[in-house]
Amino acid sequence: MTDEIIKGVLEKRRAVCRAAEAEADDRKRYALSLPEVAKAHREYVYALHDSLRLGGKERKRRAEEAYDAYLAALGRAGFSEEDFSRQVTCPICKDLGVTENGLCSCVHEEVVRALGVACDISPDGFALEDFEKTEVHGRQADLLEKIYARMNAYAQKFPEVNKQIIVCSGKTGTGKTMLAEALSRTLIRRGHSALILSAMRFNSLMLKCHTSPYSERDGILSDVMGAELLVIDDLGTEPRYNNVTCEYLLLVLEERSAKGLSTVITTNLSPDGILRCYNERIYSRLFDKRRSLPISFDGEDLRLN
Ligand SMILES: [Zn+2]
Protein backbone atom coordinates (compact mmCIF):
# COMPACT_ATOMS: atom_id res chain seq x y z
CA MET A 1 0.00 0.00 0.00
CA THR A 2 2.75 2.43 0.98
CA ASP A 3 4.74 1.66 -2.16
CA GLU A 4 1.77 2.46 -4.36
CA ILE A 5 1.17 5.73 -2.56
CA ILE A 6 4.81 6.74 -2.92
CA LYS A 7 4.67 5.75 -6.59
CA GLY A 8 1.63 7.98 -7.02
CA VAL A 9 3.34 10.94 -5.36
CA LEU A 10 6.46 10.51 -7.52
CA GLU A 11 4.38 10.19 -10.67
CA LYS A 12 2.68 13.47 -9.80
CA ARG A 13 6.08 15.08 -9.27
CA ARG A 14 7.28 13.84 -12.65
CA ALA A 15 4.12 15.12 -14.33
CA VAL A 16 4.60 18.56 -12.75
CA CYS A 17 8.23 18.61 -13.93
CA ARG A 18 7.24 17.57 -17.44
CA ALA A 19 4.57 20.27 -17.59
CA ALA A 20 7.08 22.89 -16.36
CA GLU A 21 9.58 21.75 -19.01
CA ALA A 22 6.94 21.99 -21.72
CA GLU A 23 6.04 25.51 -20.58
CA ALA A 24 9.70 26.54 -20.62
CA ASP A 25 10.01 25.13 -24.17
CA ASP A 26 6.94 27.08 -25.23
CA ARG A 27 8.39 30.28 -23.84
CA LYS A 28 11.65 29.66 -25.67
CA ARG A 29 9.88 28.94 -28.94
CA TYR A 30 7.81 32.08 -28.60
CA ALA A 31 10.78 34.29 -27.69
CA LEU A 32 12.81 32.97 -30.64
CA SER A 33 9.92 33.67 -32.97
CA LEU A 34 10.24 37.40 -32.24
CA PRO A 35 12.28 38.91 -35.12
CA GLU A 36 14.68 40.95 -32.99
CA VAL A 37 15.43 38.06 -30.64
CA ALA A 38 15.68 35.60 -33.52
CA LYS A 39 18.21 37.80 -35.32
CA ALA A 40 20.37 38.31 -32.20
CA HIS A 41 20.22 34.60 -31.45
CA ARG A 42 21.22 33.65 -35.00
CA GLU A 43 24.18 36.06 -34.90
CA TYR A 44 25.27 34.66 -31.57
CA VAL A 45 25.06 31.05 -32.82
CA TYR A 46 27.16 31.89 -35.92
CA ALA A 47 29.73 33.79 -33.85
CA LEU A 48 29.97 30.95 -31.34
CA HIS A 49 30.29 28.42 -34.10
CA ASP A 50 33.13 30.39 -35.73
CA SER A 51 34.90 30.82 -32.44
CA LEU A 52 34.70 27.14 -31.59
CA ARG A 53 35.68 25.99 -35.05
CA LEU A 54 38.47 28.44 -35.85
CA GLY A 55 39.53 29.65 -32.42
CA GLY A 56 41.34 32.88 -31.68
CA LYS A 57 40.88 35.62 -29.15
CA GLU A 58 39.14 37.99 -31.52
CA ARG A 59 36.50 35.42 -32.50
CA LYS A 60 35.97 34.53 -28.87
CA ARG A 61 35.44 38.21 -28.02
CA ARG A 62 32.96 38.57 -30.89
CA ALA A 63 31.03 35.51 -29.70
CA GLU A 64 30.84 37.00 -26.21
CA GLU A 65 29.60 40.29 -27.58
CA ALA A 66 27.00 38.51 -29.70
CA TYR A 67 25.88 36.61 -26.61
CA ASP A 68 25.47 39.85 -24.64
CA ALA A 69 23.54 41.34 -27.55
CA TYR A 70 21.28 38.29 -27.61
CA LEU A 71 20.66 38.56 -23.82
CA ALA A 72 19.87 42.26 -24.26
CA ALA A 73 17.40 41.49 -27.04
CA LEU A 74 15.80 38.86 -24.83
CA GLY A 75 15.55 41.37 -21.98
CA ARG A 76 13.85 43.93 -24.24
CA ALA A 77 11.28 41.27 -25.12
CA GLY A 78 10.68 40.63 -21.43
CA PHE A 79 12.61 37.34 -21.12
CA SER A 80 15.78 36.00 -19.59
CA GLU A 81 17.52 32.71 -20.37
CA GLU A 82 16.25 31.25 -17.09
CA ASP A 83 12.75 31.35 -18.51
CA PHE A 84 13.77 28.67 -20.99
CA SER A 85 14.48 25.94 -18.46
CA ARG A 86 12.40 24.40 -15.69
CA GLN A 87 12.92 26.17 -12.39
CA VAL A 88 14.14 23.82 -9.67
CA THR A 89 13.19 24.29 -6.00
CA CYS A 90 15.04 21.29 -4.58
CA PRO A 91 18.64 21.18 -5.78
CA ILE A 92 19.12 17.67 -4.33
CA CYS A 93 16.55 15.83 -6.45
CA LYS A 94 15.80 18.55 -9.02
CA ASP A 95 12.20 18.27 -7.82
CA LEU A 96 11.85 14.69 -9.03
CA GLY A 97 11.53 13.44 -5.45
CA VAL A 98 14.17 10.71 -5.74
CA THR A 99 17.91 10.56 -5.40
CA GLU A 100 20.37 7.69 -5.79
CA ASN A 101 19.75 6.91 -2.13
CA GLY A 102 16.01 6.75 -2.36
CA LEU A 103 13.32 9.28 -1.53
CA CYS A 104 14.39 12.89 -1.18
CA SER A 105 13.50 14.60 2.08
CA CYS A 106 11.59 17.27 0.15
CA VAL A 107 8.94 14.73 -0.80
CA HIS A 108 8.31 13.41 2.72
CA GLU A 109 5.53 15.87 3.56
CA GLU A 110 3.70 15.03 0.33
CA VAL A 111 4.00 11.31 1.03
CA VAL A 112 2.61 11.84 4.54
CA ARG A 113 -0.35 13.83 3.16
CA ALA A 114 -1.05 11.20 0.52
CA LEU A 115 -0.85 8.43 3.14
CA GLY A 116 -3.26 10.38 5.34
CA VAL A 117 -5.75 10.67 2.49
CA ALA A 118 -5.42 7.01 1.45
CA CYS A 119 -5.73 5.78 5.06
CA ASP A 120 -8.36 8.37 5.91
CA ILE A 121 -6.40 9.57 8.95
CA SER A 122 -5.31 13.18 9.15
CA PRO A 123 -1.66 13.24 10.24
CA ASP A 124 -2.39 16.47 12.13
CA GLY A 125 -4.35 15.04 15.04
CA PHE A 126 -3.15 13.48 18.30
CA ALA A 127 -0.13 11.22 17.85
CA LEU A 128 2.05 9.28 20.30
CA GLU A 129 4.59 12.07 20.51
CA ASP A 130 1.86 14.49 21.63
CA PHE A 131 1.20 12.47 24.78
CA GLU A 132 4.13 14.11 26.58
CA LYS A 133 2.53 17.51 26.07
CA THR A 134 -0.77 16.33 27.50
CA GLU A 135 -1.49 16.44 31.19
CA VAL A 136 -2.88 13.16 32.40
CA HIS A 137 -4.49 12.88 35.77
CA GLY A 138 -6.30 10.21 37.69
CA ARG A 139 -5.88 6.58 38.46
CA GLN A 140 -4.88 5.73 34.90
CA ALA A 141 -2.11 8.31 34.55
CA ASP A 142 0.83 6.05 35.45
CA LEU A 143 -0.50 3.21 33.39
CA LEU A 144 -1.06 5.40 30.33
CA GLU A 145 2.42 6.83 30.67
CA LYS A 146 3.90 3.33 30.58
CA ILE A 147 1.73 2.32 27.65
CA TYR A 148 2.62 5.41 25.60
CA ALA A 149 6.31 4.98 26.35
CA ARG A 150 6.12 1.36 25.20
CA MET A 151 4.24 2.33 22.03
CA ASN A 152 6.72 5.11 21.29
CA ALA A 153 9.51 2.55 21.46
CA TYR A 154 7.45 0.30 19.18
CA ALA A 155 6.94 3.09 16.65
CA GLN A 156 10.66 3.93 16.71
CA LYS A 157 11.53 0.39 15.71
CA PHE A 158 8.67 -0.02 13.25
CA PRO A 159 8.52 -1.98 10.96
CA GLU A 160 11.40 -4.01 12.49
CA VAL A 161 9.28 -5.18 15.41
CA ASN A 162 9.02 -8.72 16.69
CA LYS A 163 5.54 -8.41 18.16
CA GLN A 164 3.30 -8.24 15.14
CA ILE A 165 0.04 -8.30 17.04
CA ILE A 166 -0.97 -5.86 19.74
CA VAL A 167 -4.14 -6.55 21.68
CA CYS A 168 -5.43 -3.54 23.60
CA SER A 169 -8.14 -4.63 25.98
CA GLY A 170 -10.07 -2.71 28.57
CA LYS A 171 -13.41 -1.14 29.36
CA THR A 172 -14.96 1.54 27.19
CA GLY A 173 -13.42 4.97 27.68
CA THR A 174 -10.02 3.78 28.88
CA GLY A 175 -8.22 5.15 25.83
CA LYS A 176 -7.59 2.02 23.73
CA THR A 177 -8.90 3.49 20.51
CA MET A 178 -7.11 6.75 21.16
CA LEU A 179 -3.83 4.87 21.55
CA ALA A 180 -4.42 2.89 18.35
CA GLU A 181 -5.19 6.11 16.48
CA ALA A 182 -2.17 7.87 17.96
CA LEU A 183 0.09 4.98 16.89
CA SER A 184 -1.42 5.06 13.38
CA ARG A 185 -0.86 8.79 13.10
CA THR A 186 2.72 8.55 14.30
CA LEU A 187 3.45 5.86 11.71
CA ILE A 188 1.80 7.89 8.95
CA ARG A 189 3.92 10.91 9.92
CA ARG A 190 6.94 8.65 9.46
CA GLY A 191 5.84 7.55 6.03
CA HIS A 192 4.10 4.25 6.79
CA SER A 193 0.56 3.25 5.89
CA ALA A 194 -1.88 2.61 8.70
CA LEU A 195 -5.49 1.65 8.29
CA ILE A 196 -8.13 1.80 11.02
CA LEU A 197 -11.33 -0.19 10.56
CA SER A 198 -14.05 -0.68 13.13
CA ALA A 199 -14.68 -4.38 13.73
CA MET A 200 -18.10 -3.74 12.25
CA ARG A 201 -16.67 -2.38 9.02
CA PHE A 202 -13.97 -5.01 8.90
CA ASN A 203 -16.60 -7.71 9.28
CA SER A 204 -18.84 -6.35 6.54
CA LEU A 205 -15.84 -5.96 4.25
CA MET A 206 -15.01 -9.63 4.86
CA LEU A 207 -18.62 -10.57 4.13
CA LYS A 208 -18.43 -8.59 0.90
CA CYS A 209 -15.24 -10.42 0.03
CA HIS A 210 -16.80 -13.79 0.84
CA THR A 211 -19.82 -13.13 -1.37
CA SER A 212 -17.91 -11.58 -4.28
CA PRO A 213 -16.61 -13.44 -7.32
CA TYR A 214 -13.17 -14.89 -6.73
CA SER A 215 -11.55 -12.48 -9.19
CA GLU A 216 -12.66 -9.46 -7.13
CA ARG A 217 -11.48 -10.72 -3.75
CA ASP A 218 -7.89 -9.57 -3.99
CA GLY A 219 -9.04 -6.06 -4.81
CA ILE A 220 -11.38 -5.95 -1.80
CA LEU A 221 -8.68 -7.28 0.51
CA SER A 222 -5.71 -5.39 -0.86
CA ASP A 223 -5.62 -2.52 1.67
CA VAL A 224 -6.45 -4.79 4.61
CA MET A 225 -3.66 -7.16 3.60
CA GLY A 226 -1.24 -4.47 2.46
CA ALA A 227 -1.37 -1.65 5.04
CA GLU A 228 1.78 -1.65 7.17
CA LEU A 229 -0.41 -1.29 10.24
CA LEU A 230 -4.00 -2.46 10.46
CA VAL A 231 -6.18 -1.53 13.41
CA ILE A 232 -9.37 -3.51 14.01
CA ASP A 233 -11.23 -1.39 16.50
CA ASP A 234 -13.67 -2.74 19.05
CA LEU A 235 -13.49 -6.42 18.25
CA GLY A 236 -16.50 -8.21 19.66
CA THR A 237 -19.07 -5.59 18.69
CA GLU A 238 -19.57 -6.96 15.18
CA PRO A 239 -22.42 -9.28 14.23
CA ARG A 240 -21.45 -12.91 13.72
CA TYR A 241 -21.61 -14.34 10.21
CA ASN A 242 -21.08 -18.05 9.80
CA ASN A 243 -18.05 -18.96 7.70
CA VAL A 244 -16.96 -15.32 7.67
CA THR A 245 -16.33 -13.60 10.99
CA CYS A 246 -13.90 -16.10 12.55
CA GLU A 247 -12.53 -17.50 9.31
CA TYR A 248 -11.59 -14.19 7.74
CA LEU A 249 -10.27 -12.71 10.97
CA LEU A 250 -7.88 -15.64 11.26
CA LEU A 251 -6.98 -15.46 7.58
CA VAL A 252 -6.15 -11.75 7.85
CA LEU A 253 -4.14 -12.19 11.06
CA GLU A 254 -2.16 -15.09 9.65
CA GLU A 255 -1.50 -13.60 6.26
CA ARG A 256 -0.46 -10.27 7.70
CA SER A 257 1.85 -11.92 10.23
CA ALA A 258 3.38 -14.02 7.48
CA LYS A 259 4.14 -10.83 5.55
CA GLY A 260 5.65 -9.25 8.67
CA LEU A 261 2.87 -6.65 8.91
CA SER A 262 1.52 -5.44 12.24
CA THR A 263 -2.06 -5.63 13.42
CA VAL A 264 -3.63 -3.90 16.41
CA ILE A 265 -6.84 -5.17 17.95
CA THR A 266 -8.80 -3.14 20.45
CA THR A 267 -11.51 -4.87 22.42
CA ASN A 268 -13.68 -4.73 25.50
CA LEU A 269 -13.34 -8.50 25.77
CA SER A 270 -10.96 -10.16 28.19
CA PRO A 271 -8.71 -12.95 26.83
CA ASP A 272 -11.23 -15.45 28.17
CA GLY A 273 -14.00 -13.55 26.46
CA ILE A 274 -12.10 -13.74 23.17
CA LEU A 275 -11.69 -17.48 23.58
CA ARG A 276 -15.42 -17.85 24.24
CA CYS A 277 -16.60 -15.51 21.44
CA TYR A 278 -14.17 -16.64 18.74
CA ASN A 279 -12.21 -19.85 18.76
CA GLU A 280 -9.02 -21.37 20.03
CA ARG A 281 -7.00 -20.65 16.89
CA ILE A 282 -7.83 -16.97 17.03
CA TYR A 283 -7.16 -16.90 20.75
CA SER A 284 -3.75 -18.50 20.40
CA ARG A 285 -2.87 -16.25 17.48
CA LEU A 286 -3.79 -13.14 19.49
CA PHE A 287 -2.06 -14.23 22.66
CA ASP A 288 0.99 -16.01 21.27
CA LYS A 289 3.62 -14.80 23.72
CA ARG A 290 6.39 -14.70 21.17
CA ARG A 291 4.59 -12.63 18.63
CA SER A 292 1.92 -10.66 20.38
CA LEU A 293 1.84 -7.86 22.89
CA PRO A 294 -1.19 -7.73 25.18
CA ILE A 295 -1.93 -4.37 26.74
CA SER A 296 -4.60 -4.13 29.36
CA PHE A 297 -6.05 -0.68 29.99
CA ASP A 298 -7.73 -1.81 33.16
CA GLY A 299 -4.48 -2.00 34.99
CA GLU A 300 -4.34 -5.73 35.34
CA ASP A 301 -1.83 -8.04 33.69
CA LEU A 302 0.13 -5.24 32.17
CA ARG A 303 2.93 -7.01 30.41
CA LEU A 304 4.85 -4.50 28.42
CA ASN A 305 8.05 -6.33 27.66
ZN1 LIG B 1 14.22 16.97 -3.24
Image (cartoon, helix red, strand yellow):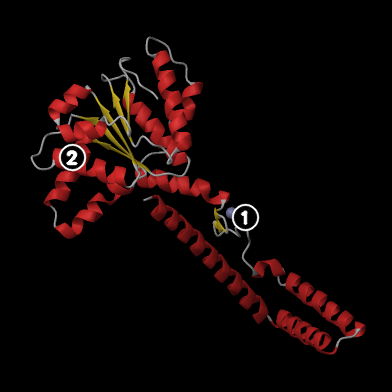
For this view, does 66 lie left or right of residue 221? right
Q: Is residue 246 among what the camera can see?
A: yes
Q: Residue at 82% x, 74% y: name it.
A: 68
Q: Residues within 10 Å of mark 1 (few under 14, many from 20)?
A: some
Q: Tag 1: residue type?
A: Cys
Q: Say what secondary structure mark 1 lies in.
A: loop
Q: Quadrant of the C terminus?
A: top left
Q: Quadrant of residue 276?
A: top left
- Spot the residue most to the top: 139
Label 1 CB less than 8 angstroms from ligand 1: yes
**N-term mark: 2 or 1:** 1
- Name the residue tied to disc 2: 203
Q: Say what secondary structure mark 2 lies in.
A: helix
Q: Is residue 301 above or below residue 209?
A: above
- Residue 19 x, y percent position in the rendering: 52, 66
Q: Residues within 10 Å of mark 2 (few under 14, many from 20)?
A: many
Location of ligand 1 given as a quarter of the image: bottom right
For this view, does 52 lie left or right of residue 299? right
Q: Is residue 77 above or below residue 36?
A: above
Spatial CA span between label 2 and label 1:
45 Å
- Residue 112 x, y percent position in the rendering: 46, 45
- Name the residue tied to disc 1: 90
Numbered mark located on residue 300 in the image: none
The residue nearer to you, when weighing 205 against 59, is: 205
- Residue 103 x, y percent position in the rendering: 53, 53
- Residue 62 x, y percent position in the rendering: 87, 82
Q: Residue at 27% x, 20% y: name it.
A: 170
Q: Tag 2: residue type?
A: Asn
